[in-house]
Amino acid sequence: MKGPKSLAIQLTSVATLAASVLLAGTAATPAADASTPRPRSVQRVSATVEAPVRTERTVIDSGHVDAVSPRIADGAFQSLLLDDRDALAPVWRTPESVILHLTEAGALHLTDDTTGFEFLGSPGHTVYCIPQTQDPAVIWAGWSTQSFTPDDVTGDLTLALDAVDGPGDVVLWEWSPFGEAEPVLDSRAGLPAAYPVPSNTHQHANWAFTEPGVYRLTFTWSADLNGTGRVSDSSVYTFAVGDIDTSTITLPGDPPSPSPSASPSSSPSPSPSASASPSASPSPSATASPSANPSASASATASPSATPSASATSPRPSSSATGTRAPAPATTPGPAAATAPTTGRLAATGFPLTPVLVTAGLLLAAGAALLTIRHRARRPD
């Protein structure tokens, strides 16, 4: 039996071994440094997942939209549209799926009293404007680079108007503190036209369309992304200007229309056996129409067209009807049945005539033979 001193030594050794094991586990898993920032790329991917890009057809005719805004989506630099009409639930959309409708509420009739707008046209002309400050009656279109910070890009981003397809010109400008127009983008000065925009910027300007109609504007965003290099992306934006039925406008993002069905000429014609006969009781298949050409008569009688030809309704000449069987009578005679020819053989209906004639002939022959025998029996030898 061990003494108390020996037992104490053993307990101390066990405690020391357990402490060593715990220290080794702690050293193998170092504590996280709360001051170490998470990679920005991880945050970017998380933001992309939380903000999907919608593609359904949408018409916007009032409210706030950052119409031309770049963003990283699906791992790529894209020029998109931020629908911010509901500030608590903004929606990213593809520009090709949206119609921005500048209604008649944006019409500006130029007169001698509309000073400051002389650069848009002469008095008497009407232009359509989106103001730099919000007017609840019309769309309030701007742009945003708030998806990027100075840590994401080198220098400014660039917004370029590359093309305008429409009935008039497009002018974007801002007002200076002295009330003078400072151009941002002007299609009249030649395209493409570029405008620098700092990162993390939300901006609005005045828009003017010089004629009503449908416009297709091609905008391109470009930037030098840190760690990626030079990137750019173009999108087509559709503006309906004036009193226009937007349901008639085709968008680049609309689904393709269904392919046209086969033409009537390519549809198989119904077989003669499936066609309805002019009469309620179809004639037997062995019955031929009173025509010199059997194939032609079969087509005329078995498969009548929607508009019957004259030969189908007119009686055949008696010469061509000789030795042929007439069509079976209809249940309800029509005009054609009333004028049908009566020449030719009897119809294949009623009591059969041939067996009667044969029977009568046999009876006559038997009677003649009987009379001959009786006559010879009466003659004297």
Image (cartoon, rainbow, N blue to C red):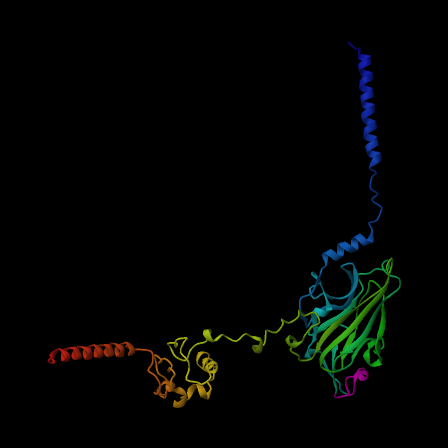
**Residue 131 visible:** no
Residue 275 rendering spot, x and y as whole percentages? 46, 76
Residue 105, image quadrant: bottom right
Name the outermost residue toward the right. 155
Residue 229 rendering spot, x and y as whole percentages? 87, 61
Q: Specify whether 302 is left or right of 77.
A: left
For image coordinates 64% across by 72% down, the residue present is 257
Of 51 and 267, the residue lying toward us: 267
For image coordinates 57% across by 78% down, the residue present is 265
Residue 185 rendering spot, x and y as whole percentages? 82, 75
For image coordinates 85% across by 71% down, the residue present is 195
Q: Specify whether 140 is left or right of 355.
A: right
Residue 277, image quadrant: bottom left
Residue 4 rendering spot, x and y as whole percentages? 80, 12
**Is 214 covered by the magenta stretch?**
no
* Quadrant holding the N terminus: top right
**Residue 365 visible:** yes
Bounds of the magenta span? 112-124
For image coordinates 45% across by 87% down, the residue present is 311
Instruction: Specify the principal SS of the magenta part.
Output: loop
Of 312 and 364, the residue lying toward us: 364
Of 202 and 195, the residue lying toward us: 195
Name the outermost residue toward the front. 381
Residue 155, image quadrant: bottom right
**Is 121 covered by the magenta stretch?**
yes
